[in-house]
Image (cartoon, grey):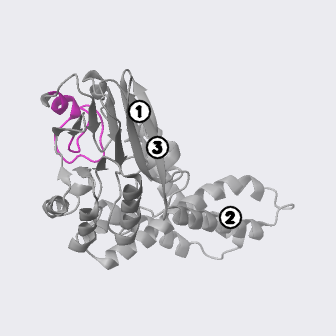
Amino acid sequence: MAIAIVAYILLAASVWYVPFSLKKLLGFQKVWPWHLLLAAVLGGYMLVLFKGIYALDSVLAAIVYNVLGVLFVFFIYLFFLLIAAYPLTLLSKRIAKRPLGIGVIAACGLLVIFGFINAQFFTVTHYDVPLNGLAQPVKIAHIPDIHLGSQRGESYLKKILSVIDEEKPDIVLYNGDLIESNIALKRELFALFSNVQTEQYFTTGNHEYYVDTDRTLQFIADAGIRILRSEMIETHGIQLIGMEYMNADRETYDAHVVNTLTIQEELPRITRNGDVPSILIHHSPVGMRYAAEGNIDVMLSGHTHGGQFFPGTALIKFRFPMYSGRYEIDRTTLIVSQGAGTFGPWIRLGTQNEVQIVNLIPVK
Protein backbone atom coordinates (compact mmCIF):
# COMPACT_ATOMS: atom_id res chain seq x y z
CA MET A 1 0.00 0.00 0.00
CA ALA A 2 2.82 2.42 0.86
CA ILE A 3 4.43 1.80 -2.55
CA ALA A 4 1.13 2.58 -4.28
CA ILE A 5 0.77 5.85 -2.35
CA VAL A 6 4.31 6.90 -3.30
CA ALA A 7 3.59 6.02 -6.94
CA TYR A 8 0.43 8.16 -7.01
CA ILE A 9 2.30 11.09 -5.46
CA LEU A 10 4.99 10.81 -8.15
CA LEU A 11 2.34 10.68 -10.89
CA ALA A 12 0.71 13.82 -9.52
CA ALA A 13 4.10 15.54 -9.33
CA SER A 14 4.86 14.60 -12.94
CA VAL A 15 1.75 16.46 -14.15
CA TRP A 16 3.28 19.65 -12.78
CA TYR A 17 6.99 19.00 -13.30
CA VAL A 18 7.11 17.74 -16.89
CA PRO A 19 5.38 20.72 -18.58
CA PHE A 20 7.39 23.31 -16.62
CA SER A 21 10.67 21.53 -17.38
CA LEU A 22 9.86 21.31 -21.08
CA LYS A 23 8.89 25.00 -21.08
CA LYS A 24 12.27 25.85 -19.62
CA LEU A 25 14.18 23.67 -22.09
CA LEU A 26 12.16 24.20 -25.27
CA GLY A 27 10.85 27.72 -24.68
CA PHE A 28 7.12 27.00 -24.66
CA GLN A 29 5.00 30.11 -24.13
CA LYS A 30 2.23 28.30 -22.25
CA VAL A 31 2.27 25.16 -20.14
CA TRP A 32 -1.44 24.66 -19.40
CA PRO A 33 -2.19 22.65 -22.59
CA TRP A 34 0.55 20.21 -21.60
CA HIS A 35 -0.77 19.99 -18.06
CA LEU A 36 -4.17 19.04 -19.44
CA LEU A 37 -2.74 16.54 -21.92
CA LEU A 38 -0.60 14.84 -19.29
CA ALA A 39 -3.46 14.73 -16.78
CA ALA A 40 -5.76 13.29 -19.46
CA VAL A 41 -3.30 10.52 -20.35
CA LEU A 42 -2.49 9.55 -16.77
CA GLY A 43 -6.06 9.91 -15.51
CA GLY A 44 -7.52 8.17 -18.55
CA TYR A 45 -5.15 5.25 -18.21
CA MET A 46 -5.95 4.82 -14.51
CA LEU A 47 -9.64 4.82 -15.44
CA VAL A 48 -9.12 2.16 -18.11
CA LEU A 49 -7.27 -0.07 -15.64
CA PHE A 50 -9.30 0.38 -12.47
CA LYS A 51 -12.70 0.33 -14.15
CA GLY A 52 -11.82 -2.80 -16.10
CA ILE A 53 -12.39 -1.14 -19.49
CA TYR A 54 -9.40 -3.09 -20.88
CA ALA A 55 -11.32 -6.34 -20.24
CA LEU A 56 -14.29 -5.42 -22.45
CA ASP A 57 -15.05 -7.30 -25.66
CA SER A 58 -14.33 -4.17 -27.67
CA VAL A 59 -11.73 -3.34 -30.29
CA LEU A 60 -12.01 0.36 -29.42
CA ALA A 61 -11.36 -0.36 -25.74
CA ALA A 62 -8.31 -2.44 -26.73
CA ILE A 63 -6.90 0.39 -28.86
CA VAL A 64 -7.43 3.00 -26.14
CA TYR A 65 -5.91 0.66 -23.55
CA ASN A 66 -2.75 0.06 -25.58
CA VAL A 67 -2.24 3.62 -26.84
CA LEU A 68 -2.68 5.13 -23.39
CA GLY A 69 -0.38 2.47 -21.92
CA VAL A 70 2.48 3.39 -24.24
CA LEU A 71 1.94 7.12 -23.65
CA PHE A 72 1.83 6.45 -19.91
CA VAL A 73 5.29 4.87 -19.97
CA PHE A 74 6.62 7.61 -22.26
CA PHE A 75 5.56 10.31 -19.77
CA ILE A 76 6.92 8.35 -16.81
CA TYR A 77 10.32 8.08 -18.49
CA LEU A 78 10.13 11.74 -19.49
CA PHE A 79 9.58 12.62 -15.84
CA PHE A 80 12.59 10.61 -14.64
CA LEU A 81 14.93 11.76 -17.42
CA LEU A 82 14.00 15.42 -16.94
CA ILE A 83 14.86 15.08 -13.26
CA ALA A 84 18.16 13.42 -14.19
CA ALA A 85 18.89 16.21 -16.70
CA TYR A 86 18.09 19.02 -14.26
CA PRO A 87 21.70 19.50 -13.07
CA LEU A 88 22.70 20.12 -16.68
CA THR A 89 20.12 22.89 -17.05
CA LEU A 90 21.94 24.82 -14.32
CA LEU A 91 24.92 25.12 -16.65
CA SER A 92 22.99 27.55 -18.81
CA LYS A 93 26.04 29.14 -20.38
CA ARG A 94 27.69 25.87 -21.33
CA ILE A 95 24.73 23.64 -22.20
CA ALA A 96 22.28 24.48 -24.98
CA LYS A 97 18.91 23.83 -23.37
CA ARG A 98 16.82 23.19 -26.47
CA PRO A 99 19.03 20.34 -27.79
CA LEU A 100 19.03 18.90 -24.28
CA GLY A 101 15.23 18.91 -24.19
CA ILE A 102 14.99 17.35 -27.63
CA GLY A 103 17.55 14.75 -26.59
CA VAL A 104 15.53 13.81 -23.50
CA ILE A 105 12.35 13.41 -25.57
CA ALA A 106 14.21 11.33 -28.16
CA ALA A 107 15.70 9.10 -25.46
CA CYS A 108 12.22 8.46 -24.03
CA GLY A 109 10.94 7.61 -27.47
CA LEU A 110 13.77 5.14 -28.08
CA LEU A 111 13.20 3.46 -24.70
CA VAL A 112 9.50 3.04 -25.41
CA ILE A 113 10.12 1.71 -28.92
CA PHE A 114 12.71 -0.77 -27.68
CA GLY A 115 10.45 -1.85 -24.83
CA PHE A 116 7.53 -2.36 -27.21
CA ILE A 117 9.61 -4.45 -29.62
CA ASN A 118 11.03 -6.49 -26.73
CA ALA A 119 7.49 -7.23 -25.54
CA GLN A 120 6.65 -8.98 -28.82
CA PHE A 121 8.99 -11.90 -28.16
CA PHE A 122 9.60 -14.48 -25.47
CA THR A 123 12.50 -16.58 -24.32
CA VAL A 124 12.56 -20.22 -23.19
CA THR A 125 14.27 -20.80 -19.85
CA HIS A 126 15.21 -24.19 -18.40
CA TYR A 127 15.43 -25.31 -14.77
CA ASP A 128 16.65 -28.68 -13.49
CA VAL A 129 15.23 -29.70 -10.12
CA PRO A 130 16.45 -32.96 -8.50
CA LEU A 131 13.74 -34.72 -6.47
CA ASN A 132 13.89 -37.56 -3.99
CA GLY A 133 11.30 -40.28 -4.56
CA LEU A 134 10.94 -39.57 -8.27
CA ALA A 135 11.06 -42.74 -10.35
CA GLN A 136 11.67 -41.15 -13.76
CA PRO A 137 12.34 -37.69 -15.21
CA VAL A 138 9.34 -35.43 -15.72
CA LYS A 139 9.41 -32.40 -18.02
CA ILE A 140 6.96 -29.60 -17.25
CA ALA A 141 6.17 -26.61 -19.45
CA HIS A 142 5.21 -23.84 -17.02
CA ILE A 143 3.37 -21.00 -18.79
CA PRO A 144 1.59 -18.43 -16.60
CA ASP A 145 0.43 -14.95 -17.62
CA ILE A 146 -0.13 -15.30 -21.36
CA HIS A 147 -2.83 -12.61 -21.02
CA LEU A 148 -4.77 -13.41 -24.16
CA GLY A 149 -6.88 -10.43 -25.12
CA SER A 150 -6.07 -6.90 -26.21
CA GLN A 151 -2.35 -7.61 -26.75
CA ARG A 152 -2.07 -11.36 -27.32
CA GLY A 153 -4.03 -13.39 -29.82
CA GLU A 154 -3.79 -16.27 -32.24
CA SER A 155 -0.34 -15.59 -33.70
CA TYR A 156 1.33 -15.20 -30.30
CA LEU A 157 -0.41 -18.26 -28.89
CA LYS A 158 0.70 -20.34 -31.88
CA LYS A 159 4.33 -19.40 -31.15
CA ILE A 160 3.97 -20.58 -27.57
CA LEU A 161 2.28 -23.81 -28.59
CA SER A 162 5.05 -24.43 -31.13
CA VAL A 163 7.56 -24.40 -28.26
CA ILE A 164 5.45 -27.03 -26.50
CA ASP A 165 5.54 -29.10 -29.67
CA GLU A 166 9.35 -28.76 -29.89
CA GLU A 167 10.08 -29.39 -26.20
CA LYS A 168 7.62 -32.29 -25.91
CA PRO A 169 6.96 -31.91 -22.17
CA ASP A 170 5.09 -34.52 -20.17
CA ILE A 171 2.86 -31.86 -18.60
CA VAL A 172 1.81 -28.33 -19.59
CA LEU A 173 0.74 -25.94 -16.83
CA TYR A 174 -1.10 -22.71 -17.68
CA ASN A 175 -0.69 -21.14 -14.26
CA GLY A 176 -3.27 -18.36 -14.22
CA ASP A 177 -3.99 -15.17 -16.18
CA LEU A 178 -4.44 -17.09 -19.40
CA ILE A 179 -7.14 -14.56 -20.30
CA GLU A 180 -7.04 -10.79 -19.81
CA SER A 181 -9.99 -9.59 -21.85
CA ASN A 182 -13.37 -10.88 -23.04
CA ILE A 183 -12.19 -10.07 -26.56
CA ALA A 184 -10.20 -13.34 -26.41
CA LEU A 185 -13.25 -15.52 -25.74
CA LYS A 186 -13.44 -16.97 -29.24
CA ARG A 187 -13.92 -20.66 -30.02
CA GLU A 188 -11.37 -20.61 -32.83
CA LEU A 189 -8.68 -19.25 -30.48
CA PHE A 190 -9.23 -21.91 -27.83
CA ALA A 191 -9.39 -24.61 -30.48
CA LEU A 192 -5.61 -24.20 -30.82
CA PHE A 193 -5.12 -25.83 -27.42
CA SER A 194 -6.83 -28.97 -28.71
CA ASN A 195 -3.82 -29.63 -30.94
CA VAL A 196 -1.44 -30.01 -27.98
CA GLN A 197 -0.46 -33.69 -27.69
CA THR A 198 0.22 -33.85 -23.95
CA GLU A 199 -1.52 -33.36 -20.61
CA GLN A 200 -2.65 -29.76 -20.06
CA TYR A 201 -3.68 -28.20 -16.75
CA PHE A 202 -4.91 -24.78 -15.73
CA THR A 203 -5.14 -22.89 -12.45
CA THR A 204 -6.96 -19.60 -12.02
CA GLY A 205 -5.19 -16.27 -11.75
CA ASN A 206 -6.70 -13.01 -10.61
CA HIS A 207 -7.51 -11.89 -14.17
CA GLU A 208 -9.86 -14.81 -14.76
CA TYR A 209 -12.14 -13.09 -12.25
CA TYR A 210 -12.11 -9.76 -14.09
CA VAL A 211 -13.61 -11.22 -17.26
CA ASP A 212 -16.64 -13.47 -17.84
CA THR A 213 -15.36 -16.16 -15.48
CA ASP A 214 -17.92 -18.86 -16.26
CA ARG A 215 -17.45 -18.57 -20.03
CA THR A 216 -13.68 -18.47 -19.65
CA LEU A 217 -13.55 -21.67 -17.59
CA GLN A 218 -15.97 -23.37 -19.98
CA PHE A 219 -13.83 -22.46 -23.00
CA ILE A 220 -10.74 -23.78 -21.21
CA ALA A 221 -12.42 -27.05 -20.27
CA ASP A 222 -13.85 -27.52 -23.77
CA ALA A 223 -10.31 -27.15 -25.17
CA GLY A 224 -9.26 -30.28 -23.28
CA ILE A 225 -7.43 -28.48 -20.48
CA ARG A 226 -8.09 -29.84 -17.01
CA ILE A 227 -8.84 -27.13 -14.47
CA LEU A 228 -7.40 -27.62 -10.98
CA ARG A 229 -9.16 -25.56 -8.34
CA SER A 230 -7.58 -26.41 -5.00
CA GLU A 231 -7.28 -30.10 -5.75
CA MET A 232 -4.60 -32.74 -6.27
CA ILE A 233 -4.09 -35.33 -8.96
CA GLU A 234 -1.35 -37.92 -9.32
CA THR A 235 0.37 -38.19 -12.69
CA HIS A 236 3.81 -39.22 -13.97
CA GLY A 237 4.82 -40.24 -10.47
CA ILE A 238 4.19 -36.81 -8.91
CA GLN A 239 1.36 -35.20 -6.98
CA LEU A 240 0.18 -32.13 -8.87
CA ILE A 241 -1.61 -29.68 -6.56
CA GLY A 242 -3.36 -26.85 -8.37
CA MET A 243 -4.55 -24.03 -6.13
CA GLU A 244 -7.17 -21.50 -7.05
CA TYR A 245 -5.95 -17.90 -6.86
CA MET A 246 -5.87 -16.88 -3.20
CA ASN A 247 -3.84 -14.93 -0.70
CA ALA A 248 -1.13 -16.44 1.50
CA ASP A 249 -3.03 -15.82 4.75
CA ARG A 250 -5.43 -13.34 6.29
CA GLU A 251 -2.71 -10.91 7.34
CA THR A 252 -0.77 -10.52 4.07
CA TYR A 253 -1.76 -7.57 1.87
CA ASP A 254 -3.09 -8.49 -1.57
CA ALA A 255 -4.07 -5.87 -4.15
CA HIS A 256 -6.07 -8.46 -6.12
CA VAL A 257 -8.47 -10.04 -3.65
CA VAL A 258 -11.00 -12.21 -5.49
CA ASN A 259 -12.11 -14.54 -2.67
CA THR A 260 -11.61 -15.26 1.03
CA LEU A 261 -9.43 -18.36 0.59
CA THR A 262 -5.85 -18.60 1.88
CA ILE A 263 -3.00 -21.00 1.23
CA GLN A 264 -2.43 -21.28 4.96
CA GLU A 265 -5.91 -22.76 5.41
CA GLU A 266 -6.54 -24.57 2.12
CA LEU A 267 -3.27 -26.43 1.53
CA PRO A 268 -3.49 -28.62 4.69
CA ARG A 269 -6.98 -29.75 3.59
CA ILE A 270 -5.58 -31.47 0.50
CA THR A 271 -4.71 -35.07 1.39
CA ARG A 272 -1.54 -36.38 -0.22
CA ASN A 273 1.04 -39.15 0.07
CA GLY A 274 4.24 -38.01 1.80
CA ASP A 275 6.29 -40.57 -0.13
CA VAL A 276 5.37 -39.10 -3.55
CA PRO A 277 6.97 -35.83 -4.76
CA SER A 278 4.52 -32.92 -4.68
CA ILE A 279 4.34 -29.95 -7.04
CA LEU A 280 2.28 -26.95 -5.93
CA ILE A 281 0.92 -24.70 -8.66
CA HIS A 282 -0.29 -21.28 -7.54
CA HIS A 283 -0.47 -18.20 -9.70
CA SER A 284 1.12 -15.84 -7.17
CA PRO A 285 4.41 -16.58 -5.36
CA VAL A 286 2.90 -15.81 -1.97
CA GLY A 287 2.61 -18.43 0.75
CA MET A 288 5.86 -20.25 0.09
CA ARG A 289 6.49 -20.65 3.81
CA TYR A 290 3.24 -22.59 4.09
CA ALA A 291 4.33 -24.75 1.17
CA ALA A 292 7.62 -25.42 2.96
CA GLU A 293 5.83 -26.21 6.21
CA GLY A 294 3.61 -28.61 4.26
CA ASN A 295 6.64 -30.44 2.79
CA ILE A 296 5.93 -29.36 -0.77
CA ASP A 297 8.89 -30.21 -3.01
CA VAL A 298 8.38 -27.61 -5.77
CA MET A 299 6.16 -24.54 -6.04
CA LEU A 300 5.55 -22.92 -9.44
CA SER A 301 4.22 -19.36 -9.73
CA GLY A 302 4.02 -16.28 -11.94
CA HIS A 303 1.94 -13.11 -11.47
CA THR A 304 4.78 -10.65 -10.83
CA HIS A 305 5.98 -10.25 -14.45
CA GLY A 306 9.37 -9.57 -12.83
CA GLY A 307 8.25 -5.96 -12.56
CA GLN A 308 7.91 -5.86 -16.39
CA PHE A 309 9.64 -2.49 -16.89
CA PHE A 310 11.45 0.17 -14.87
CA PRO A 311 10.55 1.46 -12.28
CA GLY A 312 8.48 -1.67 -11.66
CA THR A 313 11.64 -3.78 -11.82
CA ALA A 314 13.05 -1.81 -8.89
CA LEU A 315 9.84 -1.75 -6.84
CA ILE A 316 8.55 -5.29 -7.31
CA LYS A 317 10.92 -6.77 -4.71
CA PHE A 318 9.21 -4.72 -1.98
CA ARG A 319 5.86 -6.34 -2.81
CA PHE A 320 7.15 -9.80 -3.74
CA PRO A 321 10.56 -10.63 -2.21
CA MET A 322 10.64 -13.75 -4.43
CA TYR A 323 9.59 -12.27 -7.76
CA SER A 324 11.61 -13.93 -10.54
CA GLY A 325 13.73 -17.05 -10.95
CA ARG A 326 14.60 -19.77 -8.46
CA TYR A 327 14.48 -19.71 -4.66
CA GLU A 328 14.98 -22.30 -1.92
CA ILE A 329 13.39 -22.54 1.53
CA ASP A 330 14.31 -25.65 3.48
CA ARG A 331 13.61 -28.51 1.05
CA THR A 332 11.14 -26.54 -1.05
CA THR A 333 12.10 -25.02 -4.41
CA LEU A 334 10.13 -22.04 -5.71
CA ILE A 335 10.35 -21.10 -9.39
CA VAL A 336 8.71 -17.80 -10.39
CA SER A 337 8.09 -16.98 -14.04
CA GLN A 338 8.27 -13.48 -15.47
CA GLY A 339 5.17 -14.44 -17.41
CA ALA A 340 4.62 -15.34 -21.04
CA GLY A 341 2.84 -12.06 -21.77
CA THR A 342 2.40 -8.52 -20.53
CA PHE A 343 -0.26 -6.60 -18.65
CA GLY A 344 -0.88 -2.88 -18.83
CA PRO A 345 1.68 -1.08 -21.00
CA TRP A 346 2.70 -3.30 -23.91
CA ILE A 347 6.33 -2.86 -22.91
CA ARG A 348 9.18 -4.95 -21.48
CA LEU A 349 12.37 -3.26 -20.25
CA GLY A 350 14.76 -5.15 -18.00
CA THR A 351 12.60 -8.28 -18.20
CA GLN A 352 11.57 -10.86 -20.79
CA ASN A 353 8.41 -12.73 -21.62
CA GLU A 354 9.26 -16.35 -20.91
CA VAL A 355 8.13 -19.94 -21.23
CA GLN A 356 9.68 -22.08 -18.51
CA ILE A 357 10.72 -25.69 -18.95
CA VAL A 358 11.12 -27.36 -15.54
CA ASN A 359 12.92 -30.71 -15.62
CA LEU A 360 12.26 -32.84 -12.54
CA ILE A 361 15.19 -35.24 -12.16
CA PRO A 362 15.29 -38.34 -9.92
CA VAL A 363 17.90 -38.31 -7.19
CA LYS A 364 19.85 -41.57 -7.39
C-alpha distance separating marks 1 and 2: 46 Å
The magenta span reads 243-268
C-alpha distance separating marks 2 and 3: 38 Å
Closest to the observer, 96 or 236: 236
Left or right of residue 163, residue 77 in this image: right
Q: Main secondary structure of the magenta part?
A: loop
128 w.r.t. 60: above or below? above
247 part of magenta stretch: yes
Residue 172 pos. (x, y %): 30, 50
Closest to the observer, 81 or 118: 118
| Residue that badge 2 annotates | 104
Q: Amino acid at mark 1?
A: Val
Residue beneath the point at 23% across and 63% down: 194
Residue beneath the point at 54% across and 51% down: 310
* Dot placed on the residue nearer the N-terminal end, 1 or 2: 2
275 w.r.t. 229: above or below? above
Q: Amino acid at mark 2?
A: Val
Where, by quadrant of the figure, is residue 129 drawn? top left
| Residue that badge 1 annotates | 129
